[in-house]
Amino acid sequence: MKRLILPFLLLSTTAFSQSSLKPAIDKKATSIESKVIEWRRDFHQYPELGNQEFRTAKVIADHLRSLGMEVTENVAVTGVVGVLKGGKPGPMVALRADMDALPVTDRNDLPFKSVNTATYNGQETGVMHACGHDSHMAILMGVAEVMASMKDQLKGSVKFIFQPAEEGVYDVDIAGAELMVKEGVMEDVDAIFGLHIWAQIEAGKIGYRSGPFMAAVDNLNVTITGTQAHGASPWSSVDPIVTSAQAIMGLQTILSRNVNITENPAVVTVGAIHGGIRHNIIPEKVEMIGTIRTFGDEQQALVHRRITEIITNIAESAGAKADVNIGKLYPSTVNPPELTAKVLPSVESAAGKGNVIAMPPVTGAEDFSFFQREKPGFFFFLGGMEKGGDPLTTPSHHTPDFFIDESGFLLGVRTLSYLTVDYMEMNKK
């Protein structure tokens, strides 16, 4: 019996080791909280679109160099990677923040309101950090300062990944995390951690999920070709408008009859239909575009197959032809259950157990998933809603009124720092 108990106790201690550096982390993090807020406001006032984060990258690179790090710039176009070598042997822990803003015009009345504009997809637009990436960068710069202040005590090294183009870039095929992975940024990494500010969770709280957390996202492009005719004699046509309507209704059966929604949800949304030019002409062609959200490779394959089958067969039954193209974008963001169980005590230690919320799946997507496909990774949401706010009325991400309560930034710095030193403690060499 003793032989069985001892290994179990050793395993438990290894899995849930807590670093003695936490009091020092708390003290340092608190001392730089105002700097984190200043960095965030600067990034918010001067946002840049994906693969255009030139000013942003310079601010970050200069800061990392000032902390004595090895810094590499122009990673995956505009990304910045800094490596902090700890004083003791141990794993390489990666921490990631995304850098890009969105083609959204800032409508908030703030002294640091966005002043930038840009051309996006041929159109002039305002530019805004309407998804919180400004806070992600500021928080990770704060973590870098905290970790650098105790580097001689670190039982491993830390790689700070500042990633461009998380929101994608309309005129290139590969960007952001996927390109960083292709350029080798994850090759020497043992584990990676990341956060996303979340406007529908109260500041001071953290949301997470073990297993599939955020959806895979894919683009749907469909062309249905029929036979053009005068609107007064529809019997002379093969009507692609009616066919597209039937196809859209047919797609609804994927979620109601094919997907096991007791395991994970899925979404198939047709976002636009273009066909015809005149009230009395049945057009030859209709084009539809949409988005697909799934959780896990198996569910993704099922939904893709059924979309193609349904649209193709409905078009054929009408005498039309359908061309269905599905473009894969980001895979599902999945927190490995074993890693999640190991690091959850660190999160609870930073926030307090009552402030850590197990969440349902989120149908938004994140290219952090590309990092997780290379090495074990844990991703979580950091509350950014004003305390006492209503998540149903608080402006959501990607909107002109998106707003973040900065009081939650300190928790972000502490949590990423705790995850780093605790993981090192669990995996010390």
Image (cartoon, rainbow, N blue to C red):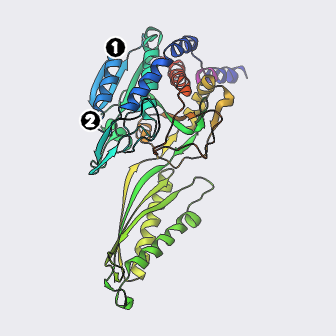
Residue wearing tag 1: 66
Residue 186 seen in this snapshot? no
Residue 210 seen in this snapshot? yes
Which residue does the image show at 54% across and 35% down from the upper left?
381
Amino acid type at circle 1 is Ser
Residue at far right of view: 1
Q: Residue 247, located in which quarter of the rendered image? A: bottom left
Relative vertical location of residue 130 with respect to residue 301 in this rendering, above or below = above
Q: Position of residue 137 (x, y in %)?
A: 42, 28
Amino acid type at circle 2 is Val
Q: Residue 64, located in which quarter of the rendered image? A: top left
Mark linked to residue 413 = none
- Describe residue 283's horizontal placement relative to residue 249 as left or right: left
Q: CA distance from mark 2 to mark 1?
A: 22 Å
Relative vertical location of residue 114 with respect to residue 62 in this rendering, above or below = below
Q: Position of residue 11 (x, y in %)?
A: 61, 23
- Describe residue 270's horizontal placement relative to residue 19 as left or right: left
Which residue does the image show at 59% across and 27% down from the upper left?
347
Task: Please tell me whether residue 16 belongs to the stretch shown in magenta.
Answer: yes
Q: Residue 176, located in which quarter of the rendered image? A: top left
Which residue does the image show at 29% across and 35% down from the upper left?
76
Q: How many marks?
A: 2
Q: Which span of residues is magenta-colored?
A: 12-17
Q: Position of residue 323 (x, y in %)?
A: 34, 69
First reached walking from the N terminus: tag 2 or tag 1: 1
Task: Please tell me whether residue 332 belongs to the stretch shown in magenta.
Answer: no
Relative vertical location of residue 190 with respect to residue 357 in this rendering, above or below = above
The kind of secondary structure element at disc 1 is helix
Residue wearing tag 2: 77
Q: Position of residue 329 (x, y in %)?
A: 38, 50
